[in-house]
Image (cartoon, helix red, strand yellow):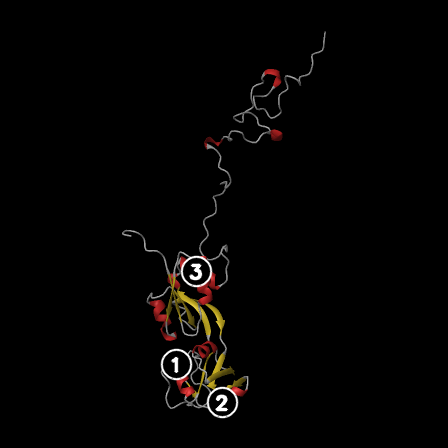
Amino acid sequence: MTGSAVPPSFRLAYVPGVTPSKWVRVWTERFPDVPLTLHAVAAGEAADALRDGAADAGLVRLPVDRAFFSAIPLYTETTVIVVPRDHAVAAVDEVSGEDLADEIVLHPLDDVLGWERPPGRPAFERPATTADAVELVAAGIGLLAVPQSLARLHHRKDLTYRTLTGAPQSDVALSWPEEATTDLVEDFIGVVRGRTVNSTRGRTAPPAPAAGERTGRARPEGGQRAEGGRGRRGGTKGTTGARGAKGTGGARGTGGAKGAKGTGRGRPRRKS
């Protein structure tokens, strides 16, 4: 509609291997009126996407520039070695870098493990991407060390993977520009940290009542008690809360708390 405010939305970037579905599901249940849009980005492009405002936050791989970004580490991935199914490594549960000394281990240009040189012997040239490296493993050119989620992402029937011990590991984190910590970012932080709907953390809580301010039933203007206010022993002290005049038979007002002292209950006079 013309002149209406743009409805809020939350844009979440995520890198290959990361699966944001469980957090998206919680967000959709908790904030049904705020759509969440997913943006898949390469690991090396995630920082630029957040810096340029293409996304409000991202599920990224550490490290990030902590001078500009805030980050909450979420989990650490196991590193695995991807091999053909008929390779000798496929016969064991795990291997070390020393076990791969005679193997060609590919080192793609988009490597996320952060090591200068993988174990084993280097290939003639570095593959451009992890996907290209997986194709070379399938062709019998060499092996590939990656986080387990990337091995699953690029799964092939003719390949398998085993745990690689003593290798660098990849940490996944929620990150966002520190100066752009919006209410929606705070809400998503609560989602990934498992906060409940009624958690007091996250957004700034509403201000507490001022000292002396009552939060219960409001009193009438002028500070007087409302009509029919609390009386003694279940009764009332009159229609306005004031003590009524002594009436016929000794009653204290028409609605006195102590009841009538007059007709039927008065003390009989002593005959002279």
Residue that lies at the very extreme toward the front in this rendered image: 157
Q: Which mark is residue 87?
A: 2
The spot of residue 245 in percent (x, y) is 56, 19
Task: Name the residue rendered at 37%, 59% in the picture.
Answer: 9
Three-letter residue code for mark 3: Thr
Under circle 1, the secondary element is helix
Do residues under tags 1 and 2 come within 8 Å of each other at their CB atoms? no
Closer-to-camera residue (44/162) = 162
Q: Which mark is residue 131?
A: 1
Badge 3, how many Cα within 10 Å: few under 14, some, many 20+? few
Gap in Å between the C-alphas at discs 3 and 1?
32 Å
Gap in Å between the C-alphas at discs 1 and 2?
20 Å
Gap in Å between the C-alphas at discs 3 and 2?
44 Å
Residue at the spot of label 3: 28
Badge 2, how many Cα within 10 Å: few under 14, some, many 20+? few
Precedes in sequence: disc 1 or disc 2: 2
State whether residue 98 appears in this view: no
Three-letter residue code for mark 2: His
Residue that lies at the very extreme toward the top in this rendered image: 272
